Amino acid sequence: MSTGSRRATIIVLSVLLLISVCLNLFVAGAWVATRWHSRPLAKVMLSYPPSLRQDMRERLLAEGPRLKAAIFELREARQRMFAVMRADPLDKEALERAMADVRAKTTELQAMVQAILAESLENAPASERQKIRPPGFGFLLKGF
């Protein structure tokens, strides 16, 4: 192996290691957050007035099977992505496809929930919508 190809290999592996560490820290942080903060969706819902929360709850329950299926698909996509990350040798193209699939599944789930929210907002009077307050996300919003 030439010095140039060895150096390129080291750089690629270093970048992949950094990405892996970042993803693992993100997952660990998400896991800890769900253990320390019970029912995160419920906390976000506190941003909305009670009448809107009730309407959202009813719509979410009505869409339960569809939402559960989307969550399951996202979990499966994440499991496939982590399996590709653990493979030896690492197939970067397969990893990129797996990551794109996770992004797509995340976007699909988010779009479903946002569509439900939009339906609730469409039926809510302006006086109720005026009571909506953005949730606080601590340090994420400081300095912006």
Image: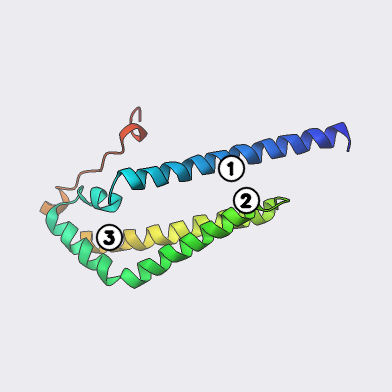
Q: Residue at x 42, y 41 (%)?
A: 29
Q: Secondary structure at mark 1?
A: helix
Residue furthest out toward the right: 2
Q: In this figure, which residue is indicated by the disc labeled 1?
A: 20
Callout 3 touching callout 1 (CB < 8 Å): no
Which amino acid type corresponds to the residue marked 1 in the rendered image?
Ser
Q: In the drawing, does residue 69 fall left or right of residue 117?
A: right
Task: Measuring from the top left, give residue 140's x and y in whole percent.
Answer: 36, 35
- Indicate which disc, 3 or 2, sits on the residue closer to the N terminus: 2
Which amino acid type corresponds to the residue marked 2 in the rendered image?
Met
Q: In the drawing, does residue 76 fall left or right of residue 111?
A: right
Q: In this figure, which residue is indicated by the disc labeled 2?
A: 85
- Classify 30 as above or below 83: above
Q: Secondary structure at mark 3?
A: helix
Task: Measuring from the top left, give residue 127's x and y in whole percent.
Answer: 10, 52
Q: Is residue 124 visible?
A: no
CA separation, marks 3 and 2?
Answer: 37 Å
- Indicate which disc, 1 or 2, sits on the residue closer to the N terminus: 1
Callout 1 touching callout 2 (CB < 8 Å): yes
Q: Secondary structure at mark 2?
A: helix
Task: Measuring from the top left, give residue 49's x and y in whole percent.
Answer: 14, 52
